[in-house]
Amino acid sequence: MKDDETTVAVAVPGSIHSGINTPLFLSGTALSIWNAKLQLQRFLLLLCGAVLTVLITVQVFTRYVMSISLFGIEELASFVAVYLYFIGASHGAWERGHISASLVELVVPEGRTREAIAAFASLITLLLCGWMTLWAWQYLAFTLKRGTMSLETGIPMVWVHGVMPVCLTLMTVYFAVELLDHLRRFGRGGGR
């Protein structure tokens, strides 16, 4: 990449295509729905982070200051953490902020070869995420069939397990968009 170019991996308020993994072909209502979904993800991340912080603070205060323990608070905190992790993972996939240990950028110069490698890596990521998504939907179906409830709070586990396939589906969509972007760049000779 040239020194004068910058890459922004976060949403730019007011832009038509507000992020790295927003498909360029979206417009109108489809783009509005896409952006609303991203806003909902961000809101839920903020909410889950705040709720988790409050639950842990209350537990620490009651346990170590008042010498009592509130029944079920640790289980609720772990459920909120599941939401936080999965929604955060899906939003990270949209941002293309997932961790990579690739040396390709250091070894292979910009161009078609680098984009071919990136497209292949994106394909593998897409296939693995799709496979995990299928498993997550099957696990949710199993949970629904069994009617599993949490031990301490009696919350139906479908509410906890339901976030997994939904967020993995979003991740699969985001990885598919990333693959299409790499294929588009490959077709253009490796340029942006």
Image: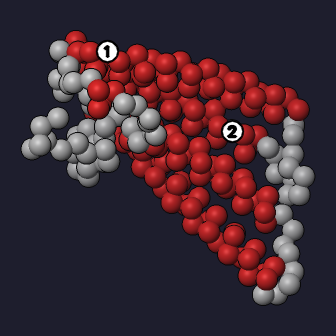
Residue drawn at the location 85% of the way across and 58% of the way down: 153
Q: Is residue 142 rendered to the left or right of residue 178?
A: right
The C terminus lies in quadrant: top left
Category of crowding for the residue at label 1, using alpha-carbon neighbours closer than 10 angstroms: few (below 14), some (14–19), many (at least 20): some
Residue 169 visible here: yes
| Rendered view: 185 above or below 73 | above
Residue type indicated by callout 1 = Ala
Category of crowding for the residue at label 2, using alpha-carbon neighbours closer than 10 angstroms: few (below 14), some (14–19), many (at least 20): some
Q: Which percent across, then down, holds residue 52?
A: 64, 64
Residue drawn at the location 69% of the way across and 24% of the way down: 135
Q: Which percent across, then down, holds residue 31?
A: 32, 35
In the image, which disc is placed on residue 162?
2
What's the distance in space between the residues labelled 2 and 1, CA to CA? Answer: 35 Å
Residue drawn at the location 34% of the way across and 39% of the way down: 32
| Rendered view: 157 above or below 69 | above
Indicate the quadrant where residue 138 lies: top right
In the image, which disc is placed on residue 116?
1
